[in-house]
Image (cartoon, rainbow, N blue to C red):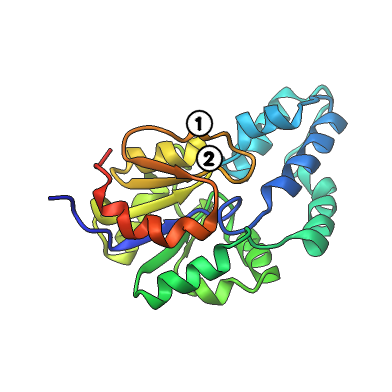
Amino acid sequence: MPISIELVIFDCDGVLLDSERLAVKIDARVTAAVGWPLSEAEIVERFVGRSHAYMSAEVQAHASVPLEPGWEQAFQHLYDEAFATELVPVDGVVRALEVLAEAGIRDCVASSSSHERLRRTLGQTGLPARFEGRIFGAEDVAHGKPAPDLFLHAAATMGVAPEACLVVEDSKYGIAAARAAGMRSLGFHGGLTPAHWLTGPGTRTFDDMRDLPALVATANGLPLP
């Protein structure tokens, strides 16, 4: 008999917020500016789902111009300006969250972003109050996705066993982290991520957030990874 889902753990970028479309375009400008030109597809492949610290270190290692620690601050205004004017929730996710709340489903956020960035980006869309006290970020653990640490930390803090958690992710690194944590998952490919990156044991894929409540309701039928 499958263990019932007690907690839904949401990634943020690309799942709650339609931020990756904006960030990847700017990432391409930044990597080109420092002498490591990458296409948007390459950036998605390498970095979507990974922490900012990981991406910063990789760019610093591959740049053709010398970069000092903190180099990325010179480009931060590009992200701030785009997010301030264009950032919105993923289509359909606000209503999906309301339906899950009405059904009494517990939830939290576990993101590769920092707490400071999560406060800023979620705040711009009015979502932080929805997850008050249940937001977990990159600096909470030593090893980010695809390691399971962040999801295990979120589950332990929420007092729920890993096998009773359901992760909603849009990156292959996040799905890998969910599987490593022994959690079932829903892989969202309604944004930049191709569906085939998300398929595998214990995972069901979908491309419309309006389908999320029904998928959560039937997730107990997913086998554990």
Please provide percent x and percent y for residue 72: 77, 44
Q: Residue at x 70, y 29 (%)?
A: 41
- Above or below, 101 against 52 in this view is below
Q: Quadrant of residue 45?
A: top right
* Residue 197, numbered circle: 1
- Per the model, the C-alpha gap separating discs 2 and 1 is 7 Å
- Relative depth, front residue between 203 and 25: 203
Q: Nearer the viewer, mark 2 or mark 1?
A: 1
- Above or below, 152 against 30 in this view is below
Q: Residue at x 24, y 42 (%)?
A: 223
Other residues around mark 2 within 10 Å, as few (<14) / some (14–19) / many (≥20): many
Verify CB contact (< 8 Å) between mark 2 and mark 1: yes
Which secondary structure, mark 2? loop
Position of residue 158 in the picture relative to residue 81 (left or right): left
Question: Disc 2 residue type?
Answer: Ser
Q: Is residue 177 visible?
A: yes
Position of residue 75 in the picture relative to residue 147 (left or right): right
Which secondary structure, mark 1? helix
Residue beneath label 2, please?
171
